[in-house]
Image (spheres, rainbow, N blue to C red):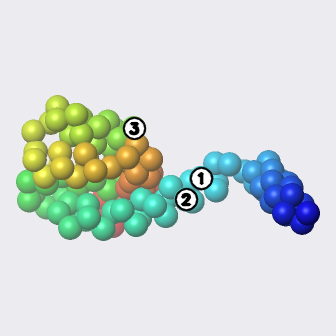
Amino acid sequence: MTQPLVSSVTVALWAVATTCLPASSSSSAADLALGRHLAGECVTCHPRDSRNVGIPVINGWPADQFVAVLKSYKARERDNPVMQSIAAALSDEEMAALAAYFETLKPGG
C-alpha cells in the first residue's frame, strides 16, 4: 500500500522540480557537462590556438555550425575517415552537447 504513495510523491516532486526550475539553465548545465566530458577525444587532435597543424581550432565555433559539420561527417558528405568514424558514433544529443561546450570556449584558451 505504500508503493502507490511513494510513486505519487515521486511524480509530485518531479512535477514541482520541472515547473519551478528554469529549463534552459538546467539543460544548459547538463549539456555543458556532457560536452566537457565528451570533448576529451576532440582536444586530442584539435588545437586550442591558431597554429596551422591541418586540423581546425573548434573553440568558439557557433553551435549550429558545429552540429552541421558533425552531421555532414556522419552522413559522409565530408571526406575524413577519422571524423566520419567519430561523428558516426555520436548521437544528436551528444553533438549538441559538444557544440554547446565548444561554443563557450575562446580560441587559444
Amino acid beneath label 3:
Asp
Amino acid beneath label 1:
Ser
Q: Residues within 10 Å of mark 2 (few under 14, many from 20)?
A: few
Residue at mark 3: 64
In the image: residue 47, left or right of residue 32? left
Residue at mark 2: 30
Give the spatial CA distance, label 2 vs label 1. Answer: 5 Å
Q: Secondary structure at mark 2?
A: helix
**Location of residue 25 (image quadrant):** bottom right
Q: Nearer the viewer, mark 3 or mark 1?
A: 1
Work out whether residue 9 can be spotted: no
Q: Residue at x 84, y 63 (%)?
A: 3
Residue 80: percent from left, percent from top: 10, 45
Residue at mark 1: 27
Q: Secondary structure at mark 3?
A: helix
Viewer-proximal residue among 6 and 95: 6
Viewer-proximal residue among 4 and 9: 4
Q: Secondary structure at mark 1?
A: helix
